[in-house]
Amino acid sequence: MCIVDVVGGRDLYEVLGIKRDASVPEIKKAFRKLSLKVPRHATTHVLVLSDETKRKKYDTYGEDGLKENGGGGGGHDPFDVFSQFFGGGRQRHPQEPSRGNDVTIPLRVSLADLYNGKNVPFTVRRKTVCHHCHGHGAANSDDIQTCHECGGHGLETRRVGPGFIQQFQTQCNKCGGKGKIVTSTCPVCGGDKTVFADVELDLDIEKGTPDGHEIEFEHAADEHADRAAGHLRFRITTVGHEFFSRDGDDLYMDMSISLREVRPT
């Protein structure tokens, strides 16, 4: 979990306006609210609490516990925290496991809803791992066998010249590089390993959300049997208002009035 300290020396929980026993969803919600008020260039110090151990260090020792010598956030890109929650086109960290493609959906929101805030129920149709075969593609688990050609490695090993063995990085022709042989077909997904399903989401649009802001749901895009799902993002697009226009946090209205109305008698 990531927490931003906008003003050096202030308590991180105080900055986010949360209790010290706040849950991960509560921290994320507070972070989204903070991101609407603080631009990236104003952030002077970022502490990354990536696991329970680091969070306990901060609770016990404060910022000193998170310094490089204390096992803290040394070497982190300060703006990775923004990318994790809100996207922004930054490349994923090299250590992050492979995942499917991210999906961005434009969401048209009225100016009134952006001003007042709104919770929007949303239904997404996406691919999910088959509940019958659990992503194996077989009718029964007993019908999945290790490929004898490659020994389950998915790579062919060939002998080149007398007494010399070279392993080529090519897929095994027998199993297609999967290392497993499936001898039956799942009756639910037809061997595709995934099926389409409707997923209900709640979009929490905070008051003052700017145009172009992205609300991200981690690993909520299409699921895959062999890797994590990508992230699903909703990009806010403001629907024009009949009377008002917006410039940042300000609302403007053009009104034609008569001279009599300007200088009432």
Image: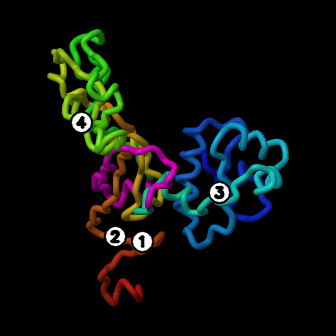
Question: How far apart in space, not on screen, are marks 1 and 4 (Cα)?
Answer: 36 Å
Which residue is pictured at 31% across the width and 39% down the height?
122
Assess whether residue 80 is covered by the magenta stretch: no
Question: How far apart in space, not on screen, are marks 4 and 3 (Cα)?
Answer: 34 Å
Label 4: which residue? 125
Image quadrant in which the C terminus is located: bottom left
User: Residue extending furthest front?
Assistant: 162
Label 2: which residue? 244
Which residue is pictured at 45% across the width and 44% down the height?
97
x, y (%) of residue 44?
67, 69
Question: How far apart in space, not on screen, are marks 2 and 1 (Cα)?
Answer: 6 Å
Mark 1 vs mark 3: give the one in front.
3
Looking at the rendering, the stretch of residues picked out in magenta corresponds to: 91-116
Label 3: which residue? 4
Which residue is pictured at 27% across the width and 17% down the height?
133
Mark 4 vs mark 2: give the one in front.
4
Pick whichever of labels 1 and 3 is earlier in the sequence. Answer: 3
Q: Nearer the viewer, residue 179 or 121?
A: 179
Label 1: which residue? 251
Q: Secondary structure at mark 3?
A: strand
Q: Is residue 18 left or right of residue 157?
A: right
Image quadrant in which the N terminus is located: top right
